[in-house]
Amino acid sequence: MIKTLIVDDSPVVRSILRDFLESDRDFQIIGEAENGKEGVEKALALNPCLITMDIEMPVMNGLEAIAEIKKAMGTPIVVISTHDTAKMAYEATVKGALEFYAKDIFTSRMTPAIRDTVLNTLKHISGITGRLPAELSRPAAPARAVEHRRIDVVVIAASTGGPKALSVFCAALPAEFPVPVILVQHNSSGFDKGFVQWLGGYTPLDVRLAQTGEMPEKGKLYVAPTDRHLRVGAEGLSFDDGEPEHNQKPAADVLFRSAARMYGGAVISVVLTGMGADGAEGTRRVKQAGGITIAQDEESSLIYGMPKAAVDTGCVDMELPLDRIPSRLVALTRA
């Protein structure tokens, strides 16, 4: 049983979240709090398996509450907030929150597929109490010999745990990084602009939301908008309104396949932390086209699902700790 504490200043939202979670017999709501201070007190008293946390609340906001809770216990925290607090929601992942969702997905917009994805993610997150991904370098697993060649683009896939990983990853890339970087981060609908603004504060790269017809340029990091697949081709960046893949839209597989077609062996793909298998088939396509493939290792991943799925294809050249990937990319793109 996943004993859950709900922290939100709105009685309506607390009721919606309670009904949503208790629709699954694996969850039990053991307490509710209407501000961050009360949330901290109840977290310490009730020792829940999972905490949902709003951001904007009276007395003590969600960021402050997360910091206080993390000082005392390793209980997994998931932020459930509104679009206008998107930047703060991403900052919460740096302070210790493991995932976040927009409040509006818990309404009539929630499809059965989204419901299952959210519940499965919460169940997985509740099982990693007290565990944080390792941040120090360790010896990397043996890598395949990679022939030096021209590189024209780096494509990246990330999901649960991705924002915090990307804040570390992107900070280590130099402003003069010699090729464009294109990213699919699985985000809640409508949070993409806030994510771009937030991530831009952690990296010297020019972070921007991808636009149709834009030709990728070096020193820039292009982020896929939510709710549309992103492709890259001869006419630049474009969108695809096709069906979700692996319950994701945008899906990294769509981006990776298009990059393999466009750039052939001049592409590097990177699969970072996340649940599911998005990026695995794309990794296979990049490798088949002659590109270089990288996956984050298990110890540094919050959730090893996506990197493991890529590794299991047999097409990953290097499995590296998070903090070793940027320097490897710099070396490969400058070769």
Image (cartoon, rainbow, N blue to C red):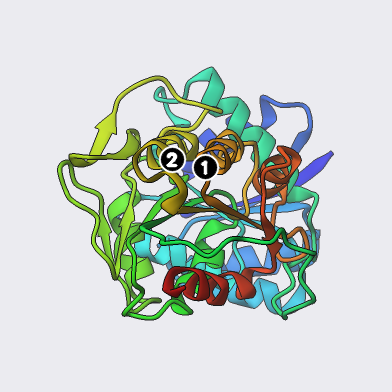
Residue 74 picture location, percent across and down: 76, 67
Residue 280, quarter of picture: top right
Q: Is residue 92 above or below residue 110?
A: below
Give, as a three-letter code, the residue at label 1: Val
Residue 286: mark: 1
Q: Residue at x 65, y 44 (%)?
A: 306
Image quarter (top left, top right, bottom left or bottom right) of the N terminus: top right
Residue nearest the viewer, comparing 179 with 45: 179
| One can see residue 27 in this view | yes
Q: Which residue is drawn at 56% across and 28% down?
A: 246
Residue nearest the viewer, comparing 150 with 284: 150
Whichever of labels 2 and 1 marks the residue nearer the N terminus, that label is 2
Circles 2 and 1: CB atoms closer than 8 Å: yes
| One can see residue 301 in this view | no
Q: Viewed as shown, does residue 310 lie left or right of 260?
A: right
Residue 260: mark: 2
Q: Residue at x 32, y 33 (%)?
A: 228
